[in-house]
Image (tube, rainbow, N blue to C red):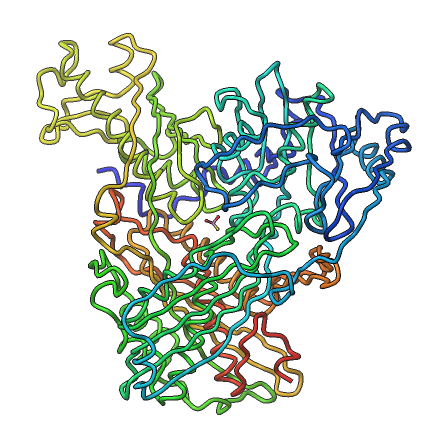
Amino acid sequence: MMRPAAGTPVSRVDGRLKVTGQAAYAAEHDAHDAVRGAVHGVIVTSTVGKGRITAIDTRAATALPGVLAVISHANAPKLPYRPFRRVTDPPRGEHLRVFQDDRVRFFGQPVAVAVAETLEAAQHAASLVKVTYAAERPATGLDAPAGSPNEPENYQRGDVDQALRQARTRIEQTYRLQREHHNPMEPHATIARWDGDRLTVWDKTQVVLNTRAALASVFGIAEDAVRVVSPFVGGAFGSALRAWPHVTIAALAARQVRRPVKVVLTREQLYTGTGFRPVTEYKLTLGADERGRLTAAVHDIRAETSAYEDYRESLLTQGQMVYTTPNVRQTYRSIPLDINTPTWMRGPGAATAAYAIECAMDELAHETGIDPIELRLRNEPERDPGTGAPFSTRRLRECLRTGARTVGWDDRAPEPRSTRDGDWLLGMGMAVATYHTARAPAQALARLHADGTATVQSATSDMGPGTYTSMTQVAADALGLPVSRVRFQLGDSAMPPAPPHGGSMTMASVGSAVADTCDKLRRQAVRLAIADPGSPLHGASAGDVVVQNGRLSLRDDPGRGETYQQLLARTGRPRLEARGGYTPGEETERYSTHAYGAVFAQVAVDERLGLVRVRRVLGVYDAGRIINPKLAHSQAIGGLVGGIGMALLEHTVTDPRDGRVVNANLADYLVPTNADVPDVNAVYLDGEDREAGPLGVKGLGEVVIVGVAPAIANAVFHATGRRVRDLPITLEALL
Ligand code: MOS
């Protein structure tokens, strides 16, 4: 019997290409024939936070040898910017229109691009562009005078005010999260080439179809006239879910100079050229009865957005469904500021909400003297308290108990500041993680070739989770082939459509489409065999034929059969081909489906220096079925490390006078390095969620960052008795 590939720790099928440098990332495609001879565009960005451009002097820049053009609002063509709503709906508002007027909306806005034969010439030219501004003072902080909120998003159930009056215990606190940037290793980059009216771009993107739709809209051309290619993405975490201004700039410049143009954002430009996790202020009031059961919760949230787009994220879901709470009121206001637009970043909304909710639960546990895990168990709902729907699966109790056992939670001395190791105060904290299971329509195409191999494709992406590999596993099982004989292809808008590679929905959506497509292809081969008088399977009934290791045979008489190669050769076909897909059904409405986790952190805090050292992080997850345990573990380690960064290090600092990001580099924007990362581990509960979709998976890319920061903050409180409510937790706050 052939062992199914799904469920086994297959190593990345693209690993060799990546470690040998053969995988082409966005900025590298001009090394290949398709775009050899691309010239270089270097973006000039605004050095004021708001105002108007009064003059642009490009004479010195254009006089340099090798310079082909300097494009700005002064000479750029008017672009149609047709409205569009697409695969990743952009926030409400008006896109930043590249080089269409003299207005400066934020510090770091693109104001010109220098295009030259070499990168050096383009950089030199960009440095010689003289821009003069009439500057105004921008509003850049949540409490800036100009920052009057957008229309709030509200939610209400029950009578919160009465419940709070009757509550035995009340916790009322404000939690603040700073701006965080994705900082993927690979910078955002685009190469654009026009062939007449047809545009091809090689782009760093999580959604080729989104980039295609955006470019079609900007240039007022048909989507069919645009092709977007993005086979490899060197990390993104949400930053590549939208097509940012530089994508348009590359295409615009290529049209102007009639050459392929490559634009690569510098590390510094990434901080204003793409989005970020927004500054959020989360005021939370909890009311509980004498047994610690939540009776009321009031969530009052404010978060930054740009003045031109109203970015929102799923900040309210968790507060509605995570604990039994009869009375809930939520208000979420975005505050328009003179900044560039924030965007989705790993665990968008959920990671932020969990910080407030899980820290407040820890405060409630401390206040009531109830063990933090016991407090969660007492508030565990039987049905989704927000929608009333049954949970498809919710194994949070098991996550909590498994984690508690593994870390020795019951041996923890509950009193804060009661355990030490020399100068180090030791603490252990925990938090709950949830992330909704999103699913969206997806399609795939599969081909079985005469040599007995198969290729399968869908216009999805692989920003690092291992989509190439997991899809290969699913396809191999459905086709009855070993993984080594299946190639999965992605990252090309010419392939069958897929939803955004984000929101932890790729496995459930694209995976289900791949399974359906490959099932169809296998059945087609079986039908061909049993209808063919030349086949040993002629006349068999389809249900009795199995395919294993590329050979079709009778289940009860394995000697009777033939291989895919034999079948195709004899019937004279170069290949068989099938298209299939997946559309989420009514189960997505009927059930409340979320991935869950319990996160445990152990920290040591130097009593005299305030230094926090994370000693251990463990996440225990209920994410449904795990297609590839090795990749799932890798995803969790990445999420847990991201959570350490969120808790202790990451903070995009802006100058309130002009909105300039003052630490726009990887030396001053701190991310966890090996020395910051201790024993991190993740455990996935065995099982599957039959209502989540055909594959039984609930998604795991986001849930693994949710809950990490509050688990660490709660551990810091347990170690020190000091409650720090503002992220990141710095040593200054602990001194
Ligand atoms: Mo993730 S924020 O959905 O890329």
What residue is at 43 percent from the left and 26 percent from the top? 495
329 shown above or below 223? below
Name, please, the residue furthest toward the top.
572
What residue appears at the point 44 percent right and 77 percent down from the top-left corner? 429
Residue at 45% from the left image edge and 36% from the top image edge: 86
Image side of residue 248 versus residue 522, left or right = right
- Count of residue discs: 0
Using the rendered view, name the quadrant where residue 265 is placed: top right
| 557 displayed left or right of 644 | left
Q: Position of residue 371 (x, y in %)?
A: 34, 84
Query: Relative to 525, does residue 302 appear above or below in the rendering?
Result: below
Viewer-closest of 310 and 679:
310
**Looking at the rendering, in which quadrant would you find the C terminus?**
bottom right
Viewer-proximal residue, 333 or 555? 333
The spot of residue 634 in percent (x, y) is 46, 54
Q: Does 435 sit left or right of 30 as displayed?
A: left
Q: Quadrant where the N terminus lies?
A: top left
Residue placed most toward the observer, 413 or 559: 413
* Vertical comparison of 68 with 277: above or below: above
Q: What is the x, y in percent for residue 174?
A: 50, 75
Q: Residue 116: percent from the left, percent from the top?
A: 79, 28
Nearest the eye: 435 or 472 = 435
Image quadrant assignment for residue 146: bottom right
At x 36%, y 48%, the residue is 628
| Left or right position of 220 against 556 | right
